[in-house]
Amino acid sequence: MRNRRTVFLIIGISFIVLTSLADTLYRDWSYANDIADFGLADYLPSITGTVAAVFTLLGISKDLKQKTISNAVAGVVGCVIYEIVQPFLGTGVFDWQDLVAVIFTGAVCSYVLTLGLGMSGNTQERQHSLLRQRINMKKLYRYLIAFALLIAAISSYSFGNQTGLFVFIILGFAFEAAFWFGLFPVRKRK
């Protein structure tokens, strides 16, 4: 459990850094250069902030085995409340896209945790062997890496489209190809 908590904490801290970068550097750069990123600059901090909240909360949780999903849902509820009260706190404005992004990201995080940790089923099914835990953590890593590749592809396409640098279009294609091949791996036939 300690190893899993450490991994969750590292993921959470990494997404805190990504949230900060998305909120300051990427958003400012996107607005300054009139980048057409399909609104990503507006709701990307909500997405990465939700992932950061969920995994940081899981990383500092003491009862990870029994309360993984409930802690993840608590993190999402906290993010939803924050999105709603931002105008009253003076930290931002209320935006429906941000609220939808938080709820969608929270649902995806909960689903990935359910798949990755094998939390579905009864109590006996929850107690896996070490090998099964490793396989499920590999699924979790695969989904998180796929998410990062998708964000990188969209960002590369957007930057290449606005600046006219074809190398970023190719880079976006490479990220997208890695996303699709990672999502649907080629299986060897026996």
Image (spheres, helix red, strand yellow):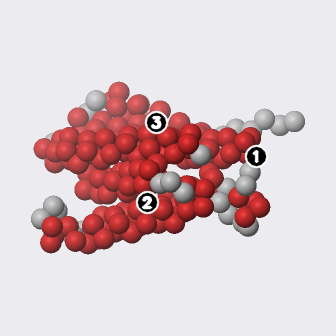
Would residue 147 be seen by someone viewing this image from the given angle? no
- The amino acid type of the residue labelled 2 equals Thr
Q: Nearer the viewer, mark 2 or mark 1?
A: 1
State yes or no: discs 2 and 1 in contact (Cβ < 8 Å): no
Image quarter of residue 183:
top right
Looking at the figure, which quarter contains the C terminus?
A: top right
Residue 188 % position (x, y): 78, 35
Q: Circle 1 sits in a helix, a strand or a loop, which is it?
A: loop
**Neighbourhood count class around disc 3 (C-alpha, 10 Å): few under 14, some 14–19, many 20 upward:** many
Sequence-wise first label, 3 or 1: 1
Q: Circle 2 sits in a helix, a strand or a loop, which is it?
A: helix
Identify residue for label 3.
175
> How far is the residue under mark 3 from the one under mark 1?
34 Å
- The amino acid type of the residue labelled 1 equals Ser
Q: Which residue does the image show at 55% across and 62% down from the upper left?
A: 67
Which disc number belongs to residue 146?
none
Above or below, comparing residue 115 to residue 87 in the picture? above
User: Closer to the camera, 4 or 146?
Assistant: 4
Q: Which residue does the image show at 41% across and 62% down from the upper left?
A: 75
**Neighbourhood count class around disc 2 (C-alpha, 10 Å): few under 14, some 14–19, many 20 upward:** many
Q: Which residue does the image show at 25% across and 45% down from the upper left?
A: 20
Sequence-wise first label, 2 or 1: 2
> How far is the residue under mark 2 from the one under mark 1?
29 Å
Sequence-wise first label, 3 or 2: 2
Q: Nearer the viewer, mark 3 or mark 1?
A: 1
Q: Circle 3 sits in a helix, a strand or a loop, which is it?
A: helix
Identify residue for label 2.
105
In the figure, is residue 22 to the left or right of 144? left
Which disc number belongs to residue 129?
1
